């Protein structure tokens, strides 16, 4: 198992550590710096990141489901296509992080960059101009332009169109209230 900076420099290489979680714990205990490290496609589900410095780290495609980011520093980190379902972002620093195509279903937002709420049966997450309702993610403008047919076809197991008609105004008010903070 290797821990490699994005410039290719090997920070740590140890064969006995067979999972990313064990490597992370080893690095935390031994205070090995993790800024600019490559953790792409790693499994960090249920991991507590604590107050660790991951500035500029590469987490593309990593699984962070149910992870706790409280107090960690992820300034300019790359989270493209990462899975954050159910994660806790309270007090974490994600300024200038790249969240393109990441899954935020059911997260606890940090109250600054990541806003979250629940309306009925669907968790709602807002990051910049990206709005995720349940498992569906689009820009705010794309949501505004969805037809009744498109909304109904998103969740055939429930009455998503009734939910949408009931909560649409609330969702867009939530977006409008947070619009200036998320730019």
Image (tube, grey):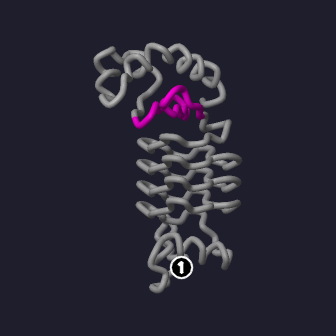
Q: Position of residue 180 (x, y in %)?
A: 64, 24
Report the label total: 1
Residue 131: percent from left, percent from top: 48, 30
Left or right relative to 152: residue 97: right
Q: Is residue 133 left or right of residue 96?
A: left
The quadrant holding residue 109 is top right
- In terms of secondary structure, where does tag 1 sit? strand
Disc 1: which residue: 12
Q: Residue at x 53, y 75 (%)?
A: 22
Examine the residues drawn in magenta and state their main secondary structure: strand
Q: Measuring 41% from the left and 54% from the top, which residue is drawn there?
A: 61
Identify the residue at image location x=32%, y=21%. Answer: 152
- Above or below: residue 16 compared with residue 101: below
Q: Give the crowd class for mark 1: few <14, some 14-19, many >=20 residues within 10 Å.
A: some
Q: Which residues are magenta?
A: 116-135
* Residue in the foreground of this view, choosing between 65 and 24: 65
The residue positioned farthest toward the front in the image shown: 158
- At 47% from the left and 76% from the top, the residue drawn is 2
Q: Position of residue 35 (x, y in %)?
A: 60, 63
- Side (left or right) of 132 relative to 147: right
Q: Relative to 131, is 27 above or below?
A: below
């Amino acid at each position: 198992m290797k821990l490699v900076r994005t410039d290719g420099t090997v920070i740590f290489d140890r064969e006995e550590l067979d999972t990313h979680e064990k490597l992370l714990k080893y690095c935390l205990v031994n205070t090995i710096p993790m800024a600019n490290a490559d953790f792409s496609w790693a499994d960090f589900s249920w991991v507590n990141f604590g107050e660790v410095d991951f500035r500029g780290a590469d987490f593309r495609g990593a699984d962070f489901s149910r992870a706790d980011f409280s107090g960690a520093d992820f300034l300019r980190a790359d989270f493209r296509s990462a899975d954050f379902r159910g994660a806790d972002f309270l007090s974490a620093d994600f300024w200038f992080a790249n969240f393109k195509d990441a899954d935020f279903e059911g997260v606890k937002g940090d109250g600054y960059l990541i806003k979250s709420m629940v309306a009925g049966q669907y968790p709602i997450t807002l990051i910049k101009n990206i709005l995720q309702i349940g498992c569906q993610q689009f820009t705010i403008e794309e949501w505004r332009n969805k037809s009744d047919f498109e909304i109904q076809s998103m969740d055939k197991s429930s009455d998503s169109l009734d939910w949408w008609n009931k909560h649409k105004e609330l969702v867009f008010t939530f977006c409008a209230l947070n619009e200036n903070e998320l730019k």
